C-alpha cells in the first residue's frame, strides 16, 4: 500500500505561502525548489487548494495568499482538497474474494466496521490539527 506524500507537500507549500506570500510572489518553480518536487505537482496541489477555497491565486501579476487564518484551516480540509477519494482508497477490501470460501464470502461484512472506524479516527485526527499548529511547530524548529 502506498500512502501519498501530497499532504506533506501541500503543508510545505502552505507554510511557504503563510511565511512569504505577502512579501514575495511565490511561483510554482520556487515552491518546487523548496519541496524538491516537480512544478507541475505544485501547480496541481495549488489548484486543488484554490478550488477548495483555501488559497487565492492572482492571475497575471501572480501571488498566492491564504483565504483565511491558519487556525481555521485543518489538515482534513487540506487532505480532502488534494486527495478527494483518499479516505475511501486508503484502506480497502480486495475486490474479488472467493464466494465459495466461508472467509471470502464474509470478508466485506467482517472488515466494513473496523475499516470504517479507522477512517473515522483518521478524519477526526486530521480535523483536530490546524495549519496554525503546524506553523507554530515550524517557528519552534527555527529557534
Image: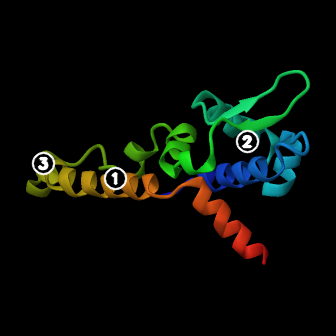
Q: Which residue is drawn at the image coordinates 31% and 52% (left, top)?
A: 120
Disc 2, SS: helix
| Residue picked out by circle 1 | 119
Asked where in the image residue 131 lies, by quadrant, the reply is bottom right
Could you tell me residue 38's position as x and y percent? 80, 46
Residue ranking furthest to the bottom:
143
Q: Is residue 35 left or right of residue 73?
A: right
129 or 49, which lies in front? Answer: 129
Q: Which residue is drawn at the image coordinates 34% and 53% (left, top)?
A: 119
Looking at the image, is 135 positioned above or below residue 140?
A: above
Disc 1, SS: helix
Disc 3, SS: helix
Q: Which badge, 1 or 3, comes first in the chain's sequence? A: 3
Counting other residues with Cα less than 10 Å from the Cα at mark 1, is it few (<14), some (14-19), or many (20 or more)? some
Could you tell me residue 47's position as x and y percent? 68, 31
9 or 137, which lies in front? Answer: 137
Which color scheme does this rendered protein use? rainbow
The quadrant in which the C terminus is found is bottom right
Q: Which mark is residue 95?
A: none
In the image, which is nearer the foreground, mark 1 or mark 2?
1
CA gap between label 3 and label 2 equals 40 Å
| Residue picked out by circle 3 | 105
Amino acid at each position: 500500500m502506498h500512502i501519498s506524500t501530497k499532504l506533506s507537500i501541500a503543508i510545505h507549500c502552505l507554510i511557504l505561502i503563510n511565511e512569504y506570500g505577502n512579501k514575495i510572489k511565490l511561483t510554482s518553480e520556487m515552491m518546487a525548489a523548496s519541496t524538491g518536487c516537480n512544478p507541475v505537482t505544485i501547480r496541481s496541489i495549488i489548484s486543488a487548494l484554490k478550488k477548495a477555497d483555501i488559497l487565492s491565486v492572482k492571475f497575471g501579476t501572480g501571488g498566492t495568499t491564504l483565504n483565511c487564518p491558519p487556525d481555521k484551516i485543518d489538515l482534513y480540509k487540506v487532505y480532502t482538497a488534494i486527495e478527494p477519494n483518499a479516505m475511501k482508497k486508503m484502506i480497502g477490501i480486495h475486490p474479488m474474494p472467493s464466494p465459495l470460501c466461508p472467509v471470502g464470502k464474509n470478508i466485506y461484512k467482517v472488515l466494513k466496521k473496523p475499516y470504517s472506524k479507522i477512517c473515522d479516527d483518521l478524519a477526526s485526527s486530521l480535523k483536530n490539527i490546524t495549519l496554525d499548529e503546524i506553523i507554530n511547530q515550524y517557528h519552534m524548529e527555527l529557534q
